[in-house]
Structures are given as C-alpha cells and as structure tokens.
Image (cartoon, rainbow, N blue to C red):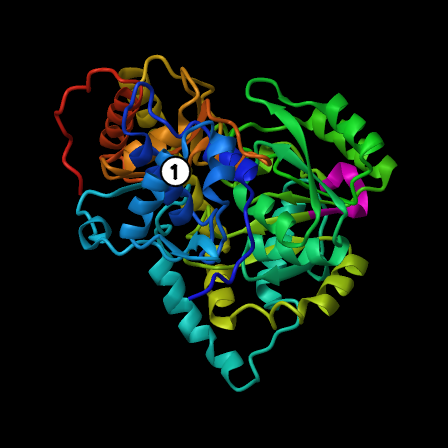
Amino acid sequence: MEPLGGRISGRRLATLLGEWRQRGSRQGASDLAAAVELHVLDGQLPIGTRLPAERELADALGVSRTLIGAALDRLRADGLVASRRGAGSWVAGVGNRDEAEAVRDDLLDLARAAPPAVPGLMAAFDTARRDLVEYASGNGYLTGGLPRLRERIAERYTARGLPTSPDQVLVTSGAYSAFVLCLRMLTGPGDRVLLEQPTYPNAIDAVRATHALPVPVALDPVHGWDLPGIEAALRQAAPRFGYLVVDFQNPTGLRLDAAGRERLGGLLARTRTPVVVDESLVELDYEGDPVDGPPPLAAFGGDLVLSVGSAAKSQWGGLRLGWIRASTDLLDRLQSSRFAVDLGAPVFDQLVLAALLEPEGYEVLARRRTEFREQRDITVSALRKYCPEWTFQVPSGGLSVWCRLPEPMSTRLAVSAATRGVQLAPGSRFGVHGGLERWLRLPFGLPREQLPEAVRRVSAAAASVRGCADVPAERIPVT
C-alpha cells in the first residue's frame, strides 16, 4: 500500500525526536525505534506520514546509515513502518505486537491531565432523562445551545466579574471544538497566531492544520507571562489571532493576576488582536472559590476576547461539551460558519451539564477541589521523595505539575516509562517547535492511592535513562 500522508523532513523529525538516545547506550537502533514508536502512538507521526530517506535522516541525527537501517528494520517488524522500493518508508500503523498491545492491569496513564467523573453524574443523567421529554417532540437542533445551559454559563461569568447574558454564549462540542471554530473563522493560511511557549499541544496541532504560522512567546516557569515580550510580538509579528491560557496554564499551572490581565487586555485592545482565552481549568482553584479569583481576561480586553470553557476538566472528559463567551456580533458570525464543522451539541448531554451546573453542583465541585488539592500534595510529596533532583513550582490550581529535569531527557524518559507501565507526554509535545527536553508534565488526576506508585515508576525510568542504578523495587498496590 502506498503512503497517503505528507512527508516529514529529516531535520523536522530530528527536532521532534529530541534527545532520543539513552546516555551511554550501545542500543542506538533500539533507542531510535522506541522514540519513533512513541511519537506514532502519540499521534505526532500520523499513519501515512512519509519518512525521510535513510541518508537524510542519518545526516540530521548525526548517526550512521547502518543504525538508521537497523531501526527501520525493527519498526517494520513491529508493523509501525512499511517500505517499498521507489516509494521509501512511511508510517503504516500502530504496531502488531500482541504482547505489547495487551492491556496491563497496572497501566497508569499520565499522558492525559483528566479526572474521573464528578460525583453526582448519574443523578444528573436521571434528571436529564426526565427533562428530555420536553425536547423529544422537537427536531433536536438547538441553535446556540440549550437555553437553560446558556443561562447557567452566563450566570457563572457574571459571578466571576464579567457581566454576561445567555445570548453571549454558544454551546459547542468541547473546548477544543470551540477553539477550532474560532480559528477557522478568524484566520487563514499564512496568518500568524500568537501562542504561549509551552502550551496545550492540540492548540499547536490545530494552528498547523489550518496552515497558519504559530508565533511562540516564552512563558517563564516561575515568573509567568513576559508581557513586554508579548507586546513586542504583537508589534513586530502582527499576529492575526492568539490563543492563551491564563488560569492554571497547561502545562505550567501558572495563573496571571488581575494587574497582569489588565495590562495584557489593554495590549490586545490597542492592537485589535482577537484571542481565544481557554478557561477549561478555571474551576480547579485550590486557594479559594473561583468566583473570588481574578476576573476573566475578557473583562479587560473588550469584545475581541473570546472566552472558551469546558466540562471536561471540572466535570468529566466523557461529557464532550464546551462553550464560547463572546459578543453577540461575533457569535452570530461563529454560528453562521459553524455549520461547516457540526450542526450543534447533543441535547441530552446539554441537559446533563445543565443539571450539574445547578447551585448544588458547585458545592460538589468545591469538594472535588479539596480532593484534587490532596492529590496534588500527594504527588508533590512523592516527587520530593523519589525525584529529589527535579525542581517545580507547586501549582495553585489545575491538574498537573510542570517539572524541570536534571538533564535533557524528556523523550527518552517517556519511552523508558512506557516499559514500566506508565504513559507520559514528553516535554516536546508542549513546544511549538519541539524541544523542552528538560521538562515533563506530571498530572495528578489518578486515584490518590496510585499516585506514589506512578511517581516511583517514573523515577525508576529516569534512573534507567541516566544510566544509574534502579530505585528500590517495592510497589504500592494499584487498584
């Protein structure tokens, strides 16, 4: 079968793979094959992607063609890569090794910063099932979203300091869908899009999918947003659009204070730069009630700031619902262009979320924040025990800790951790142009009894990568 996807250059693949070779390892072909496999499974090398020629890749990686050929042989044997004379090699699948694909009873997923369902979900389903009778006689298409849900979302924005009416809310099929909808309407091929560095990986992928050009602005892991740098980027690069996460930023966990928001909002207003502000994590505030936190950036940036929210992080990832809060003029334009993407969110799911956003639902969220704060503290304690050389800021909200590693090894660490039953997203996934090999995002959404074991396994993987003796093999039971 011929490859169907595009081609990745040797230089780009080398950047994507990062520090793939284990220090002192003589198993270079095995290390390279494992790194390529990680990026195939992670979706960064989609099926059909044509790989660079052996000589080109050898030059880009600074290794011999013999090593490249041996790595490709391993990938072909595992079913990840296919080759044909005259057509080269390409990504053919996600592997066919039955043992490797078998589900481990103790697999720990730290690649996704996502929690289980909020308590009370089933009761909300029961309420929605009763309320569905009111809508079942209609055609099921609700322009803009369920009125009751839009009211609940508008009330929350108003309580947080941004007066909002229901007609300023558009319900979508998740925050990511909301971002893509805004991106498609406000940008075109070749337009520049301002992004934080590091940032949410799917946002980077969405920008590239529209053939826009990402413009990264560095985010300091301690001090946060470089507002002079953002001002310079707005002035010199003149981006057409921007994407920011100012509440418990993914992956750093940082939060921009009210004074910073006022200054940033003024910059955006003066340059007439529309931005999407992703507020998916705003309800996971471990220092107080989210209502008492800084007002949304839209309170300072005017009508060109589009606020995007989601039920995925606070309620449940399986509830694929999000929303856009914007001016009615912008929402009218978004609604008109939406039909090229989808025809609206499911009515039943909207009824469930509306039930979860009743006043008692926020009492449940308050208890959930207490639980997540405890899970954060357990993770921090385990990091200090098992990974004393790692440095990090304890996040005041969100779902993950952004860790600085003692050496550039994030990709190799993710490969090694996979052999120990832990799935990780390497730091390169959060960089606009890869890199970030000294960084690792460590989510704490797993059950509290699994978190110390997850960190211990990651520590063992790190010791293996660094060529050190393994850590003690005692294990905490996984349930």
Magenta region, residue range:
298-306
Q: Can residue 157 be seen in this view?
A: yes
Residue at (78%, 39%) from the top-left corner? 301
Image coordinates for residue 77, horizontal then vertical, percent = 27, 51
Q: Which of 367 and 53 is in front in this view?
A: 53
Question: Relative to 3, is 416 above or below?
Answer: above
Residue 234 appears left or right of 418: right
Picture quadrant where residue 67 is located: top left
Question: Relative to 339, is 232 above or below?
Answer: above
Q: Nearer the viewer, residue 301 or 54?
A: 54
Residue 302 is inside the magenta segment:
yes
Image coordinates for residue 355, horizontal then vertical, percent = 47, 61
Count all numbered tags in the image, as a single digit.
1
Question: Relative to 350, is 13 above or below?
Answer: above
Question: Relative to 104, is 337 above or below?
Answer: below
Residue 465 appears left or right of 207: left
Q: Quadrant of the N terminus?
A: bottom left
Picture quadrant where residue 271 is located: top right
Q: Is mark 1 on a helix, strand or loop?
A: helix
In the rendered image, which residue does mark 1 sit on?
A: 68
Considering the whole magenta stretch, tell me its main secondary structure.
helix
Residue 311 appears left or right of 339: left
Name the residue type under label 1.
Ile
Q: Nearer the viewer, residue 450 or 67?
A: 67
Image coordinates for residue 97, horizontal then vertical, percent = 23, 53
